[in-house]
Image (spheres, helix red, strand yellow):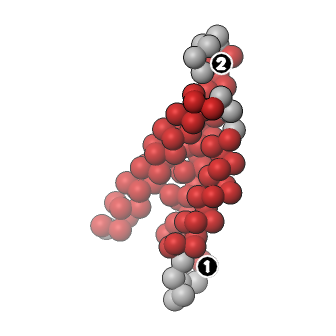
Amino acid sequence: MREIIQEIVGTVLFFVLFFGIGFILNMLIKTTWMPTWLYVIIVLPLGVWYFWKPDLSLLSFLGVFLLPFAAGIGGALTSGWAIKSLRKNGYRMF
């Protein structure tokens, strides 16, 4: 039971963390989809490299880390979509 709660909390934290980082990067650098590409190119390989243990099979690794990694990419994509819609609605700051 404790592991399921940790998985849910970790998934929500990954989404919020990468949404916030992506939103701030989009405001500062003014590129819409760069945080998503940075997540795919840098964060995913580093996460797999750091968390992979020799005794884990691919199926057990994906079972544990698929939801947080998917939530992270979802947060990065949502931040790009939010910035794009804010720019479309006339907010010049973004």
- Is 94 drawn above or below residue 39 in the view shown? above
- The residue sitting at 50% across, 58% down in the picture is 68
- Is 9 drawn above or below residue 90 in the view shown? below
Instruction: Name the residue type under label 1.
Output: Leu
| Of the pair 63 and 85, the residue shown nearer to us | 85
- Is 42 drawn above or below residue 57 in the view shown? above
In whole angstroms, how far apart are the C-alphas of marks 2 and 1?
Answer: 41 Å
**Quarter in which the N terminus is drawn:** bottom left
Q: Residue furthest bottom?
A: 55
Instruction: Name the residue type under label 2.
Output: Arg
Asked if the residue at tag 1 contacts the one at tag 2, i.e. Cβ–Cβ closer than 8 Å, the answer is no
Which comes before the other along the chain, label 2 or label 1?
1
Say which mark, if any, is on residue 9: none
Say which mark, if any, is on residue 58: 1
SS for dot 2: helix
- The residue sitting at 68% across, 41% down in the picture is 34
x and y percentages locating residue 64 in the rendered image: 49, 69
Q: Quadrant of residue 66?
A: bottom right
- Mark 2: few, some, or many residues within 10 Å (few <14, many ≥20)? some
Q: Nearer the viewer, mark 2 or mark 1?
A: 2
Q: Which residue is mark 2?
A: 87
Q: Quadrant of residue 78?
A: top right
- The residue sitting at 58% across, 66% down in the picture is 46
x and y percentages locating residue 84 in the rendered image: 66, 25
Q: Can the viewer see residue 29 in this picture? A: yes
x and y percentages locating residue 40 in the rendered image: 67, 55
Q: Residue furthest top?
A: 90
- The residue sitting at 52% across, 33% down in the picture is 24
SS for dot 1: helix
Q: Can the viewer see residue 82 in this picture? A: no
- Mark 1: few, some, or many residues within 10 Å (few <14, many ≥20)? few
**Quarter in which the C terminus is drawn:** top right
